Amino acid sequence: MMDKDLLSIQEARDLAAQAYEAQLIWGKASQEQVDRVCAAMAEAGYQASDRLGRMACEETGYGVAAHKKLKNELASRILWESICDVKTVGVIRHDPEKRLYEIAWPMGVVAALTPSTNPTSTVFAKAISAVKARDAIVFAPHPSAVNSSNEAARTLQQAAENAGAPAGLISCMRTISLGGTQELMRHKRVRVILATGGEGMVKAAHSVGKPAYGVGPGNVPAYVDRSADLEKAARYIVSSKSFDYSLICASEQSVVADRPIAAQLAQLMQVNGAYFADEKTADILRNILFNPDGTMNVATVGKSPQFLAQLGGFEIPADTRIIVVRLNRVGPEEPLSREKLTTVLGWYEEDGWEKGCERCIELILFGGRGHSLVLHATDQDVIMQFGLEKPVFRILVNTMSTLGAVGMTTGVMPSLTLGAGGEGGSVTGDNVTVHHLFNIKRLAYEITPPPEAAMVGSGKSSGPTQQELESIVRQVMLEALAKK
């Protein structure tokens, strides 16, 4: 039997080489060819959204198949509609006054690391964006989502080839090992890395020494102000936290409720399926959700509240959609103040938006720097204060955090790769899409004559005069003779 690690390394090398050859061809494609191929990919992905959503759910055991279908639709047709008019070939902008031309230039081969939480939708989004930028892309999927990720990549590659793209433009590793993934990232033909997943994966991507877009965890607070539409806020929070069993990194992790409306908000959330746990149940959740080192127990990721109750040996109402735990601390001593990629939500109460702001910042700094925050309020002064003060790059107002952050219900760019900026150790705070996957050349004509002092023969040169040069030469010759 052959060593799995060696097989994985060889596969990474082969796919990177094939991608390079395909990109050499694709890099010469016209804008019309690029757009025809990408449109075909987006439509193929959209049509396969239901099938691949079910496949991802069955393979990983995470989430809700119907919700994964929605994410696939977002990452295919909706994403394509947001970038279809973007120019990625030839001259993309011209400033006649500055006599400046901007020319699109593909990066080349993209190495894409994808998570088990969103294994098919992330493949869709990255592949369509990369091909639109005239790049090739090779995926290294999470080991627990190899089949669904490969099928998503195969679906798009087949559609691309049928529309005129070269073979090997989109590919996905099947034999997964740490060594193989590292080989892909380090391969000489790879020009940029797109890493979506856990903190360890993101750090590995950044350590390779190549340009990398690494995006990791969020610890998203949801502040509900006394000015909020409470019925809407309650319904949105429960719906968002239960969406795909909280597998999107922008899902709400804790509610910070303004004290005067906290009791009413809790009641409205209960009407919508929130179960408020007692302290005994909270202790059980602390023990089953997290390992002693603070990492999340993978057996509880993307699971229903009923599954968690059965695992923990406690009872909840049959119609429960999320479990809410009242908390008063943030940090390592309170595990439930961490990011929870499952149907458990923290609950804090603070009196006034200023105190609520402080608690939100505390949560963000504990595992969610740069990521996202959702705010429910109608007081524009409060909304703007949160916008100005929070160290995150997506501040979502009166919407579901999960769907708002990825661009389904807001005007931000549709994407499953959410940058956390310098605050979170990322190179960008944007939703990563086609704009991040090609470079721009500048063709610049002279519009301002150079200063006379910079010109040869101006008489104002800062260098030595001819007489000074002759004196230096004589001195060097005399010193050489003296040594003899």
Image: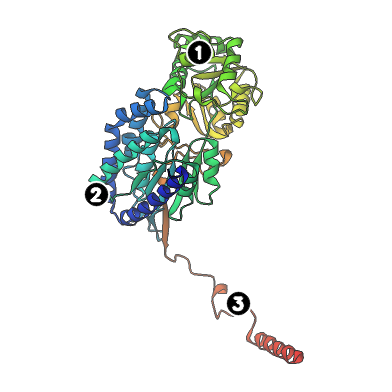
Q: Position of residue 74 (x, y in %)?
A: 35, 32
Quick one: 154 or 371, which is closer to the camera? Answer: 154
Q: Earlier in the sequence, mark 1 or mark 3?
A: 1
Tag 2: residue type?
A: Gly
The N terminus, quarter of image = top left
Foreground mark, 2 or 3, reads: 2
Tag 1: residue type?
A: Ala
Return the mark for residue 286. none
Return the mark for residue 164. 2
Q: Position of residue 454 (x, y in %)?
A: 56, 73
Q: Earlier in the sequence, mark 2 or mark 3?
A: 2
Name the image colouring: rainbow
The C terminus, quarter of image = bottom right
147 with respect to 247 (left or right): left
Q: Residues within 10 Å of mark 3 (few under 14, many from 20)?
A: few
Foreground mark, 1 or 3, reads: 1
The residue tagged with tag 2: helix, strand or loop? loop
Q: Earlier in the sequence, mark 1 or mark 2?
A: 2
Query: Does 271 appear above or below 394?
Result: above
Which of the 4 image quarters holds residue 51? top left
Residue under pointer 3: 461
